[in-house]
């Protein structure tokens, strides 16, 4: 059975990437990003999850180029905790927001005992981790004894954008908790507790509107002197090749 390549249709292929929609997957590892937005100068923290589905026939592709012997056996994807980064606000610090998300995911795996051990490891049963980076590093080091064997049901949403080739792509993120109507979660061990993917509500459309195909281009004058402020703080990333 062949590995499915971008743009290929027909035949008997293995799909190596998870995408928009509902799926059942485990967490391979957590990843953390931090930095400062250039326009607002506000600091942010982003939490990413590397998800992997149950094993599929033909699976076994490297997780990273650096370590080709460590392989996914199921379809995989990098999924952000939210379509927004964690930032300081009136509701709390960015560190509190990131740590709370991590804790909620671990508890959803019904690994409260693992979370308690993490806390106990740090200092006399009191959580002394001061940064999400320390917490992520500690969890990833002990993952083989924790959440890695638990397959949760997920609702994966996405933010639409157009890449340099003019193709519509989606930056994946965990669906937002549904507080209206039936209270459904974005992830749970119980499938019936999870939101059913809905394109109308779970895809954030590109603000530039629908993709247009043109045969000719007219020259235009572009003022790049204030380009940073025009672009704002968010620059989407092409996630098409995240699973190597």
Image (tube, rainbow, N blue to C red):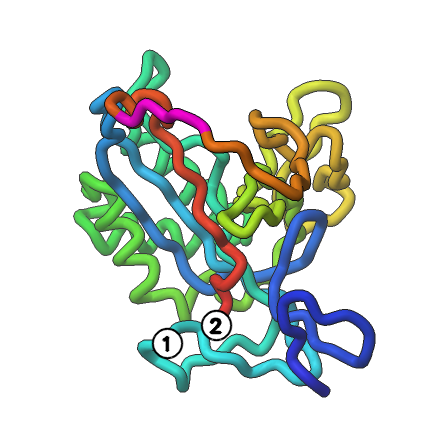
Which residue is drawn at the image coordinates 78% and 44% (left, top)?
192
Where 127 falls versus 31 (above or below)?
above
User: Which mark, by number, is residue 244?
Assistant: 2
Asked if residue 217 lies left or right of residue 104, the reply is: right
Q: Position of residue 102 (x, y in %)?
A: 41, 44
* Residue drawn at the location 40% of the way across and 86% of the way down: 69
- Image coordinates of residue 7 in percent, x first then y, are 68, 66
| Quarter occupied by the N terminus | bottom right
Tell me if 200 is positioned left or right of 166 in this view.
right
Residue nearest the viewer, comparing 127 with 93: 93
Residue segment shown in magenta: 220-224
Q: Position of residue 137 (x, y in %)?
A: 26, 57
- Whether 74 is among the magenta residues is no
Query: Residue 185, how many percent across, how many down?
Result: 65, 36
Which secondary structure lies at badge 2? loop
Tell me the residue at 52%/47% (across/down).
Answer: 163
């Amino acid at each position: 059975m062949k590995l499915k390549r971008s743009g290929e249709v027909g035949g008997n292929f293995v799909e190596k990437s998870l995408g928009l929609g509902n799926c059942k997957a485990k967490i391979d590892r957590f990843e953390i990003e931090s930095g400062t937005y250039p326009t607002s100068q506000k600091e942010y923290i982003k939490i990413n999850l590397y998800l992997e589905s149950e094993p599929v026939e033909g699976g076994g592709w490297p997780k990273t180029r650096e370590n080709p012997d460590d392989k996914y056996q199921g379809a995989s994807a990098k999924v952000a905790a939210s379509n927004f980064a964690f930032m300081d606000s009136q509701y709390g610090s960015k560190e509190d927001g990131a740590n709370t998300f991590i804790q909620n995911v671990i508890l959803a795996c019904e690994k409260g005992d693992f979370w308690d051990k993490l806390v106990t490891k740090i200092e006399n049963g009191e959580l002394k981790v001061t940064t999400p980076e320390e917490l992520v590093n500690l969890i990833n080091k002990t993952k083989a004894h924790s959440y890695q064997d638990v397959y949760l049901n997920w609702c994966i949403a996405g933010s639409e954008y157009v890449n340099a080739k003019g193709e519509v792509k989606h930056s994946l993120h965990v669906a937002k908790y549904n507080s209206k109507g039936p209270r459904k979660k974005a992830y749970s061990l119980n499938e019936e507790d999870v939101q059913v993917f809905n394109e109308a509500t779970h895809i954030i459309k590109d603000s530039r509107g629908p993709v247009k195909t043109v045969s000719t281009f007219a020259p235009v004058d572009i003022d790049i002197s204030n380009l940073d402020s025009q672009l704002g703080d968010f620059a989407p990333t092409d996630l098409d090749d995240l699973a190597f």
